[in-house]
Image (cartoon, rainbow, N blue to C red):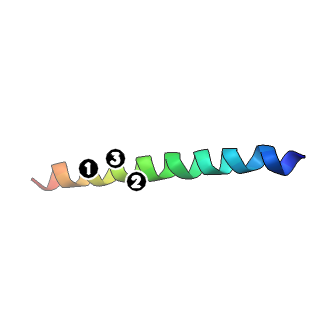
Amino acid sequence: GTQGNIEPLRAQAQGQRQEDQEEGLHLLQEQRR
Protein backbone atom coordinates (compact mmCIF):
# COMPACT_ATOMS: atom_id res chain seq x y z
CA GLY A 1 0.00 0.00 0.00
CA THR A 2 0.93 3.65 0.30
CA GLN A 3 2.65 3.26 3.68
CA GLY A 4 5.32 1.10 2.04
CA ASN A 5 6.17 4.03 -0.24
CA ILE A 6 6.15 6.61 2.56
CA GLU A 7 8.64 4.90 4.87
CA PRO A 8 11.69 5.12 2.54
CA LEU A 9 10.94 8.79 1.87
CA ARG A 10 10.85 9.42 5.62
CA ALA A 11 14.21 7.69 6.05
CA GLN A 12 15.69 9.79 3.21
CA ALA A 13 14.40 13.01 4.76
CA GLN A 14 15.95 12.09 8.11
CA GLY A 15 19.27 11.26 6.46
CA GLN A 16 19.33 14.60 4.64
CA ARG A 17 18.55 16.42 7.90
CA GLN A 18 21.47 14.73 9.64
CA GLU A 19 23.83 15.69 6.81
CA ASP A 20 22.61 19.30 6.94
CA GLN A 21 23.17 19.42 10.69
CA GLU A 22 26.69 18.01 10.34
CA GLU A 23 27.52 20.55 7.63
CA GLY A 24 26.22 23.33 9.88
CA LEU A 25 28.45 22.13 12.73
CA HIS A 26 31.49 22.11 10.45
CA LEU A 27 30.72 25.68 9.35
CA LEU A 28 30.35 26.83 12.97
CA GLN A 29 33.65 25.19 13.93
CA GLU A 30 35.43 26.86 11.01
CA GLN A 31 34.03 30.28 11.98
CA ARG A 32 35.28 29.90 15.57
CA ARG A 33 38.87 29.39 14.45
Is 12 on the left-hand or right-hand side of 29?
right
Residue type at the position of mark 2: Gln
Of residues 5 and 28, the one nearer the viewer is 5
Of residues 29 and 18, the one nearer the viewer is 18
Residue name at image x 76 percent, y 48 percent: 6
The residue that mark 1 highlights is: 26
Q: Which mark is residue 23?
A: 3
SS assignment at label 1:
helix
The residue that mark 2 highlights is: 21
Residue name at image x 51 percent, y 45 percent: 16
Residue placed furthest toward the right: 1
Q: Position of residue 17 (x, y in %)?
A: 50, 51
Is 14 on the left-hand or right-hand side of 32?
right
Residue type at the position of mark 1: His
Q: CB of mark 3 within 8 Å of CB of mark 2?
A: yes
Image position of 29 with respect to 8: above or below: below
Q: Which class describes the residues within 10 Å of circle 1: few (<14), some (14-19), or many (20+)?
A: few
Residue type at the position of mark 3: Glu
Q: Position of residue 20 (x, y in %)?
A: 43, 47
Is 10 on the left-hand or right-hand side of 20?
right
Q: CB of mark 3 within 8 Å of CB of mark 1?
A: yes
Of residues 28 and 22, the one nearer the viewer is 22
Is 21 on the left-hand or right-hand side of 6?
left
SS assignment at label 2:
helix
Which circle's residue, 1 or 2, is located before the other in the chain?
A: 2
Q: Which class describes the residues within 10 Å of circle 3: few (<14), some (14-19), or many (20+)?
A: few
SS assignment at label 3:
helix
Residue name at image x 68 percent, y 44 percent: 9
Q: Disc 3 and disc 1: Cα gap in Å?
A: 5 Å
Residue name at image x 78 percent, y 43 percent: 5
Q: Disc 3 and disc 2: Cα gap in Å?
A: 5 Å
